[in-house]
Structure formats: C-alpha cells, structure tokens
Image (spheres, rainbow, N blue to C red):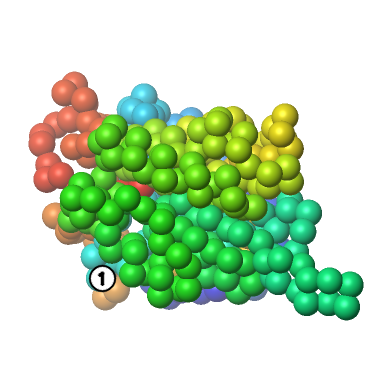
C-alpha cells in the first residue's frame, strides 16, 4: 500500500483487485486510503491498463483487457516456458522478467532474486527448526547438557548466507559449501565452517556475473564424496543451489539421505526447479524409511507473505520509475537501456529476448542479457 502513493506521484491511476493483499495482511481499505481504486477482480484491474504488475507470470488470457503495448512486469519464470511466452506475445503486451535484471549497482534496488532469496534462506531455517524435534542451541541445564544442532548449508548465495546467519543466531553449529571460491570468505565471516574440494576447477568456478558455473562430473564426484561423509553427521541440511536456465543440480543422493540420523531434517529450496535432494516432492514434507524429513515447500519466500510483498513492491516500483518521464508523467520506455534489454521478453507480438526467441518469433537479434537464476515470490 505504501508504494501506491508513489505510483500516484508518478502520475498513475492505480487499480487493485479486491482481496489482492489479504494474504499479506493488507486490506482493501488500506489500498483505498493510499489513493487506489479497488475493483472486483483481476480482470477489472487489468482492463484498460498501461502497466500490469504481477507476482508471477500471468496467463495470456488474463491480459486481453490491457491496452495495446501495455507493460506487464512480473517474475516471469521464462526458462522452459517458451510456449507460454509466445502466447503472451500474441496479446501484444511487452512482458518484462524481473528476475533477469542485471546485477549492476543501479539495479540493486530492483533485484528480486536477492530480496526474495534472502527471505527464503531465513524461512528455511525457521521451517527446519519447526520440523526438528530438538533445540538448536547448546543448553546447559540442571538436568543435563543439550548439544547444539549441526546445520549444513549447501549453496552460499543470497539464500544460503542468510540461512547461515539465521542458524548461527539460533545457536547451531553451522557449516556450508559452495562451488564459488568467493563464497569461502563469506561463509567464514559469518562464523560457519567451509566444506569444499578446493582444486583448480574450484578456483575457476564462477561466471563474470557472480553466478555458479556447472561443474564437471569429476568435480561433482569428488565433492559428493566429501559431502557424503559430512552429511551423515548433520542434523539439518538446507540446499539452495540453482543454475540459471537449467534444472537444479542433484546434491544429496538417496544414499546420503539414508546415512542421516532419524529425526534429521532436509530443506530443499530448489524443489520447484527439480530439487537438489533425491526424494524431495514439491509441496510436500516426506518422511523417509529411516525417519529423515525432506521438506519441499513451494514459494518459500511467500511463507513470509507480508515481508515478501513489501520488498517485491519496492523492487517493482524502482524499475517502473525508470520507465516513466517524471516531467510529463507519461510512459517513456528507453528501449536501448540495459535494464530494459536484459528483462524484456515480448514486444509488438513477438518474443524478442535473445535467450528465448525462436527464429519465427524474433524480429531481429538483440544483445544478450546477463544470466539470472530462479526465485520464489
């Protein structure tokens, strides 16, 4: 609701579907109080719109009421969904994928991957503590000493680092692994132990954009052997590994799961992309034959709906602000701006992003955009 006032300041008339903020604890009255018009449903909100803001990629059918050439801005999840992009292109809207935002200084405030993954990493530890039948911190009591829980974080990106910090705050003994060399110092700075095979391939395992590269089968085998012995001693394992545009890498095998103690918990934050853990089921908590819980919650950042909405709304506003001329208070998209070129998926009836356009739909080649990963919102 706070950003509604900002959009009005940009010259916009804001329409919100009734009940849109219910899951985040924001009532229709708050939107109206901020100056928005609350309408019956999404179709009424989209009708006549120049800009459509969504959390996830809308269905093409839901966009037919928008103005010709309207800007649709969402977490578009384009990888593997080219058919859906073609359908949206057919409506004539310009679809932007917030998760493809380049990781450059001026776009930091628009980085949905960071804002949402940060929350997912925090929530993963909270969910783990709820499923784990024991306390996290060491407790020295008259009835005896309770040992600290051992937590292993696999993947030390934004989500992983927040998970490390959260588990440490709860008093756990924390270790972590990542294929990117820069992660070692970050992990250790948070008070966790770094676990990785640090060979020559490891030293080269990062893209210029700061993302993890896919590792060779040989490296994966060496890393798996090291982590297998480590996982057997852990109470909690949280996996966060994603590779842009590819299925999530398999990090925890069935044998590793079987080696863990009964009552142990595994949280798979990559479950929507195929999962890092053997036996993880999207949307379910699975208990294995040896008593290990594998948690596959969907949309983990959305389990903190109010905070996720607050941060995502600010990400969206920061981007929309660059698409509006503040003097004339009219849309003024700079189509050659690097933020636009990196995030624009469809325009003028075609899929135009070079990473997703087919030869039939692409009117002309465009500069390649930086890679970006998947995010739950």
Q: Which residue occupies the foreground of this view, 345 or 295? A: 295
Question: Residue drawn 77% across and 59% down?
Answer: 134
Residue 180 horizontal/vertical position (percent): 29, 55
The residue that appears at 37% across and 43% down in the rendered structure is 223
Q: Which residue is mark 1?
A: 106
Residue at 29% of width from left, 32% of height from top? 217
| Rendered residue at 45%/65% (across/down) | 193
Q: Reply above or below: 48 against 281.
A: below
Give the x, y percent position of residue 167. 59, 66
Figure quadrant of the N terminus: bottom right
Instruction: Name the side, left or right, on which 153 lies relative to 367.
Output: right
Viewer-side residue, 187 vs 284: 187
Mark 1 crowdedness (10 Å alpha carbons): few <14, some 14-19, many ≥20: few
Task: Examine the rendering and report whether any part of residue 159 can be seen.
Answer: no
- Evaluate whether residue 233 shows in this view: yes
How far across and how far down the image is residue 28, in percent? 69, 62
Give above or below for 141 relative to 22.
below
């Amino acid at each position: 609701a706070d950003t509604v006032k900002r959009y009005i300041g940009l010259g916009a008339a804001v329409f919100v579907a009734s009940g849109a903020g219910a899951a985040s604890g924001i009532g229709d009255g708050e939107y109206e109080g901020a100056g928005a018009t609350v309408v019956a449903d999404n179709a009424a909100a989209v009708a006549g719109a120049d800009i459509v803001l969504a959390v996830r990629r809308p269905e093409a059918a839901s966009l037919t009421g928008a103005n010709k050439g309207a800007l649709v801005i969402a977490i578009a999840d384009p990888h593997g969904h080219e058919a859906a992009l073609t359908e949206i292109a057919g409506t004539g809207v310009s679809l932007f994928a917030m998760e493809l935002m380049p990781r450059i200084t001026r776009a930091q405030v628009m980085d949905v991957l960071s804002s949402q993954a940060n929350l997912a990493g925090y929530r993963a530890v909270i969910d783990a503590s709820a499923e784990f039948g024991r306390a996290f911190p060491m407790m020295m009591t008259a009835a005896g000493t309770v040992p600290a829980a051992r937590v292993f974080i696999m993947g030390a990106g934004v989500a992983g680092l927040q998970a490390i910090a959260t588990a440490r705050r709860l008093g756990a003994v924390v270790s972590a692994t990542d294929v990117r060399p820069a992660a070692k110092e970050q992990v250790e700075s948070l008070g966790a132990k770094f676990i990785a095979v640090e060979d020559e391939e490891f030293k080269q395992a990062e893209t210029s954009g700061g993302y993890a590269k896919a590792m060779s089968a040989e490296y994966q085998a060496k890393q798996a052997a090291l982590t297998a012995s480590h996982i057997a001693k852990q109470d909690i394992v949280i996996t966060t590994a994603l590779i842009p545009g590819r299925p999530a890498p398999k990090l925890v095998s069935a044998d590793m799961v079987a080696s863990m103690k009964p009552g142990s918990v595994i949280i798979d934050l990559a479950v929507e992309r195929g999962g890092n853990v053997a036996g993880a089921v999207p949307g379910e908590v699975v208990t294995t034959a040896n008593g290990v819980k594998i948690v596959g919650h969907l949309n983990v950042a959305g389990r903190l709906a109010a905070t996720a909405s607050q941060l995502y709304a600010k990400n969206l506003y920061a981007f929309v602000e660059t698409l509006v001329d503040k003097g004339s208070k009219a849309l003024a998209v700079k189509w050659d701006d690097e933020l636009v070129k990196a995030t624009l998926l469809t325009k003028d009836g075609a899929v135009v992003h070079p990473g997703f356009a087919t030869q039939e739909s692409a009117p002309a080649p465009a500069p390649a955009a930086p890679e970006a990963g998947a995010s739950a919102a």
